[in-house]
């Protein structure tokens, strides 16, 4: 009898009704943890993409419409518009580049708009499309600046023939500085896009969302 009592007492010590098994606690701890690998960067850049693209497309189309409207208005004038008419004639060499620049900006704006929508949906291809847009935007900005340097210099020379050589040199220096500042300003957002969207945790976050 004594042996039985010791055995029962030992069993009571090993199996306690007040103990909670670890397997029962594991799901609760997992439910309280946030989803692993999620990043807010795609959502932030998706919103900025859409706003940036919308403004870019609107401004590009508005600049072309304004140029046509100004040319039509000058053409409707008689003696008063001769000076402006001459200016538009001299601007003729630059018109093709202005149209090309507007067309490229609209196309890249559409690409960025699609990428922004994709980022809001956490699509991995939207990150790749964003990087493509960033590279294309930088190349387009630098390329268009180089293409228009010659025609813009000729236009400034013709418009400043009466101002002397000093004014011409000042305008050329001002144009060069404006080109550099313009390129830097245009490249800011594409560079930020490439820096943030190519981070490993952003790619992992988009991968996990795509596989889910």
Image: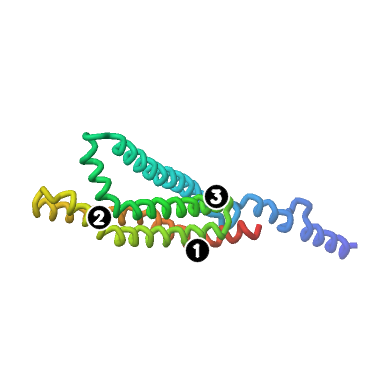
Image coordinates of residue 70 in percent, x first then y, are 32, 39
Residue reaching furthest to the front: 78
Q: Residue at x 20, y 52 (%)?
A: 156
Label 1: few (<14), some (14–19) or many (≥20) C-alpha neighbours in 10 Å: few
Label 2's element?
helix
Relative to 33, is 90 on the left or the right? Answer: left
Task: Nearest to the eye among marks 2 and 3: give it.
Answer: 2
Frontmost of labels 1 and 3 is: 3
Mark 2 to mark 3 CA distance (whole Å):
37 Å
Q: Residue at x 27, y 46 (%)?
A: 88
- Find residue 86 and report its image quarter: top left
* Front in this rendered view, residue 131 or 23: 131
Earlier along the polypeptide chain: callout 2 or callout 3?
3
Q: Which image quarter is the N terminus in?
A: bottom right
Label 3 secondary element:
helix
| Residue 41 can be seen in this image | no
Q: Which residue is mark 1?
A: 200
Name the residue nearer the viewer: 56 or 62: 62
Q: Which mark is residue 152?
A: 2
- Per the image, the residue denoted by label 3 is 117
Question: Residue at coordinates 25% horizontally, 55% vertically from top-left?
Answer: 152
Q: Position of residue 6 (x, y in %)?
A: 83, 62
Counting residues from the start of the chain, the first of labels 2 and 1 encountered is 2
Residue 3 badge:
none
Quadrant placement of the C terminus: bottom right
């Amino acid at each position: 009898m004594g042996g039985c009592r010791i055995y029962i007492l030992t069993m009571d010590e090993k199996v306690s009704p007040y103990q909670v098994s670890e397997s029962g606690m594991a799901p609760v701890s997992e439910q309280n943890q946030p989803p692993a690998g999620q990043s807010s960067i795609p959502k932030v850049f998706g919103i900025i993409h859409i706003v940036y693209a919308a403004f870019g497309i609107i401004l590009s189309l508005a600049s072309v419409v304004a140029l046509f409207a100004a040319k039509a208005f000058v053409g409707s004038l008689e003696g008063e518009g001769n000076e402006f008419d001459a200016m538009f004639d001299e601007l003729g060499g630059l018109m093709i580049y202005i149209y090309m620049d507007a067309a490229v900006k609209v196309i890249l704006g559409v690409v960025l708009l699609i990428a922004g929508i994709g980022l809001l949906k956490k699509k991995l291809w939207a990150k790749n499309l964003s990087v493509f847009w960033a590279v294309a935007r930088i190349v387009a900005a630098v390329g268009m600046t180089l293409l228009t340097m010659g025609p813009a210099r000729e236009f400034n020379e013709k418009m400043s023939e009466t101002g002397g050589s000093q004014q011409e040199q000042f305008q050329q220096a001002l144009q060069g500085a404006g080109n550099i500042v313009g390129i830097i300003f245009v490249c800011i957002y594409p560079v930020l896009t490439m820096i943030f969207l190519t981070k490993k945790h952003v790619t992992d976050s988009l991968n996990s969302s795509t596989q889910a």
